[in-house]
Amino acid sequence: MKRVEKARISDAVQMHQLINYFADKGEMLARPLSEIYENIRDFFVVREGERVIACAALHVNWADLAEIKAVAVAEESQRKGVGDQLIAACLEEARELGIPTVFCLTYKPVFFERFGFTQVDKMELPQKVWNECYRCPKFPNCDEIACIYHLELNSKEN
């Protein structure tokens, strides 16, 4: 298994290239390099040597809600458990932060359902989660699927 680590500033350009490779294929939202730098603390990465082969972010939206986003795994590293490790790291960080609900918007709901996410109507999510949508070429005709996960937190974690 590869090791999941918090992203470093030096990873940003490679993360940008990886994310936008899949965005160009219509599989995820493109992200400007400036956004990756501004949110570098949200990101986890997996590296092979100095090469970033995968990334994912846990972005806190509110006291009780966070989003897993920008999940990207290089094609040659897919189906090897790397994505699973990233999602597990994001969920663990949400648990450590005491955030009870995590959601994602995805074209691959089956991947997230393996972790216990369930599909929900996008309209069930608070309006504040839509702050990036205006950048999407599919806006306002979103065809992503919303999935949600409820963490079991110990009472002293809240």
Image (cartoon, helix red, strand yellow):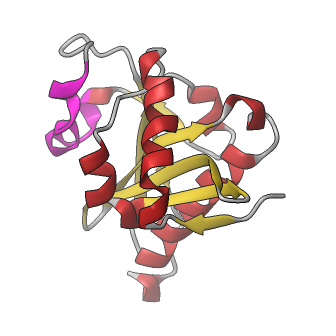
User: Residue 131: where, in percent of width, then height?
Assistant: 16, 39
User: Residue 28: where, in percent of width, then height?
Assistant: 43, 26
Which residue occupies the foreground of this view, 79 or 68?
79
Identity of the residue drawn at 65% across and 33% down: 111
Answer whether residue 36 is visible to the viewer in this image.
yes
User: Residue 91: where, in percent of width, then height?
Assistant: 54, 60
Identity of the residue drawn at 57% across and 25% down: 108
Q: Is residue 147 above or below residue 26?
A: below
Q: Is residue 18 left or right of residue 140?
A: right
Q: Is residue 128 left or right of residue 48?
A: left
Task: Tell me if residue 132 is in the magenta stretch.
Answer: yes
The magenta stretch spans which residues? Answer: 123-136
Identity of the residue drawn at 33% across and 51% down: 36
Answer whether residue 100 is visible to the viewer in this image.
no
Extreme-bottom residue of the structure: 156
Which residue occupies the foreground of this view, 115 or 140?
140
Q: Is residue 9 above or below residue 52?
A: below
Tell me the quarter of the image containing the N terminus. bottom right
Which residue occupies the foreground of this view, 82 or 141?
82
Q: Is residue 24 left or right of residue 128?
A: right
Q: Is residue 53 above or below residue 147?
A: below
